[in-house]
Amino acid sequence: MFADVFVILYAAHHLSDYPFQTDHQAAHKADRTVTGWIANGVHAATHVATTAALLWAGTLLLHLHPTATGTAAALAWLGISHSAIDRRAGVRWWMEHTGQRGYLAHGGALTVDQAAHIGLGLLPAAMMLATL
């Protein structure tokens, strides 16, 4: 089940981060303002809702059997981790402290952001769905 749910989470992530994310959310989700927190929260909620819908479809069409505990844990983790990564401070800190300042200056933050979402968000969530 791990591979099936990982592919579902990966598709939901890309749908939520690109076609389902508004320009406003993209521009403000890291702002240290009320507007920024709202944009970030709505964007993270979009991830949770999109993932839940695709997991539901996968459960029906692929005959997957995730537990309620695993699903709740995975969705909560996805929302929290996505929100935290999108605040951008962690990505910036990582790049500044691991010899990637040049990459950061030339637009590499998006790639590191996506790697963090996959490795720190999607992968643990898929493990929760497959094991809990």
Image: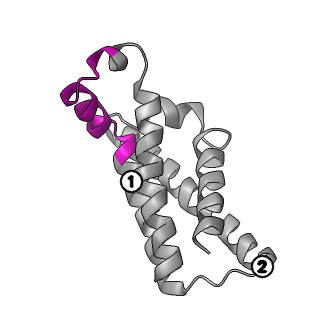
Return the x and y of residue 12 as percentages of the image width and height.
63, 55
Write the start and end of the magenta stretch as one range: 85-102
Residue for point 44% across, 41% down? 115
Name the residue carrying label 1: 120
Name the residue carrying label 2: 60
Classify 10 Å Cα crowding around label 1: few (below 14), some (14-19), many (20 and above).
some
Disc 2 element: helix
Is 101 contained in the magenta span?
A: yes
* Residue 92 visible at all: yes
Q: Hey, what amino acid is under mark 2? A: Leu
State how far apart marks 2 and 1 are (Cα): 27 Å
Frontmost of labels 2 and 1 is 1
| Residue contact at pointers 2 and 1, CB within 8 angstroms | no
In the picture shown, does residue 83 fall above or below 95?
below
Q: Give the mark nearest the N terminus, 2 or 1.
A: 2
Return the x and y of residue 60 as percentages of the image width and height.
77, 79
The image quarter containing residue 52 is bottom right
Residue for point 23% across, 23% down? 99
In the picture shown, does residue 65 fall above or below 117?
below
Residue nearer the viewer, 37 or 115? 115
Residue for point 68% across, 67% down? 53
Q: Hey, what amino acid is under mark 1? A: Leu
Quarter in which the N terminus is drawn: bottom right
Classify 10 Å Cα crowding around label 2: few (below 14), some (14-19), many (20 and above).
few
Residue nearer the viewer, 61 or 19? 61
Residue 44 as seen in the image, left or right of residue 2: left
Q: Magenta region's main secondary structure?
A: helix
Residue for point 32% across, 36% down? 91
Residue farthest toward the right in the current orientation of the protein: 61
